[in-house]
Amino acid sequence: MKEKKQLMRLFGAVLVMVLLAAAVNDVMAQARVMVAGGEELPVLDDAARTTIIDSVSATINEVYVFPEVAKKMTDLIKKQNKNKAYAELTSPIEFTDRLTEDLRSVCHDKHLGVQYVTDEMIARFTNEDEEQNREREIAEAQYDNYNFRKIERLSGNIGYLKFNGFSATEGAGRTAIAAMNFLAYVDALIVDLRDNGGGSPAMIQTLSSYLFDDPVHLNSFYLRKEDSIKQFWTQPFVDGPRLSNTPVYILTSNYTFSGAEEFTYNLKNLKRATIIGETTGGGAHPVQSLLHDSLNVVVRVPFGRAINPITGTNWEGTGVEPDIKTTADSAYDVAYLEALKKVQETTADENKRAELGWYIAGLNARRNPVMLTETELSKYAGEYGPRKVWLENGVLLYQREDRPIYRMYVMGENLFGIEELEYFRIQFVPDENGEYNELIGLYSGGQRDGNKRTR
């Protein structure tokens, strides 16, 4: 009981049904920084290593979701210890890292791990009273904006939402609701999870609920201790409009993990989203963390497993395969292009179709750039009434009167786009001798204006 209470204070969260103990990872990173910053590490001897192994083994055998795998893991590290495989590991950091490596060689479970925690880290949290600890957690979460990084309406009325963790709805709920309301009237939605390591199933419920009209069974967890199954469904009420008919695209990377994988896996199997990017990390087990404070050791132990209502299984060890495979760096452009095409295909508004075609052409040009030599580019340089085009360091630059200067990029024969001005392009008109004596400004709405070369 004492260890569990200290754990709650140390990591500042109720560690029940948490797919990724993000707070745990933060603490581990801080512990390493503190050690690197000069806190003296204890030196482990055979007795200390054996005590840690016995304590870690007891925790894993009691909690780990698969008892038979737990026994194989603990048998291995005990055998390794008996055979003196750890005899030269006197650093607690190196020793716990090696234990994690050996345990994972059996279970292949990326959520499971053993970590050394400094006295300073333990003291920092356990010396605070509950109210101080709670206030600190709230302040830190608010400063981080509950992991929400960017909400944007892209050209073509495509929504973009990037957040790097599924924060607990207790604090983050209002931010999530505000984000979804901002995006309520987009024609397609891109959800960027490339830097998302997971988090709270309640936040997964909240965000998913905006994407369906009727109640939907998202996921279930089998819990070993209770020998029971807990179901997660979309919520019957959301604050604001739903996006139930809005095409959704999810961006993934090999870093995308745990709760972010659940969100992705759920929507993929419900055929509610198109997944674009890389295969995800492969962690599907909810995790509990237990502090052995007298040993300065934290054990992260998965205590359940996800059961998808459609597949009957989960993404543990395999990750979530994207529908469109591409690099993480390219995923945004690929998704944006797919979204624009989808909306263009489904709209009956001819003006809207033309506008979307404009943005599609611009995105294709940026993804597949045409390279011209400086000699070729220099032919376009000149002054065209209030407009000026000149070559600088191999790049054409554009300016109208005393307005900002913009870089130009090639889109086609004599056609150039203007960086940062998606609605505007320039067409150069050659005369019978192939000289460019006229510039025409083209606008996404179909307007045109031109200027003859004046210099």
Image: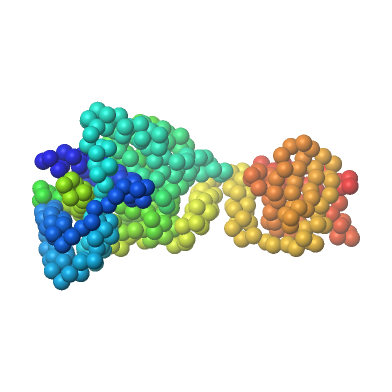
Whole-percent x and y of residue 175? 39, 33
Along the viewing direction, whichever of 127 and 73 lies nearer the viewer: 127
Image x and y of residue 434, in percent: 86, 60
Most extreme residue toward the bottom is 83
Residue located at (47% from left, 61% from top): 326
Could you tell me if residue 314 is visible in this image?
Answer: no
Report the colour scheme. rainbow
Task: Give the residue drawn at x 82%, y 57%.
Answer: 379
Q: Residue at x 13, y 69 (%)?
A: 82
Q: For this rendering, which residue is in front, 369 or 217?
A: 369
Question: Would you place residue 243 above or below residue 90 in this image?
Answer: above
Residue 408 in sight here: yes
Looking at the image, which residue is at 61% across and 43% down? 351
Which quarter of the image is occupied by the N terminus?
A: top left
- Picture quadrant of residue 313: bottom left
Q: How many marks?
A: 0
Q: Position of residue 200 (x, y in %)?
A: 29, 43
User: For this rendering, which residue is in front, 388 or 48?
Assistant: 48
Which one is in front, 224 or 436?
224
Whether 316 is drawn above or below 397: the answer is below
Using residue 221 as the reference point, say whether residue 61 is left or right of it. left
The image shows residue 209 at horizontal and vertical percentages of 32, 40
- Is residue 81 found left or right of 343 in the rendered image? left
- Res 111 → quadrant: bottom left
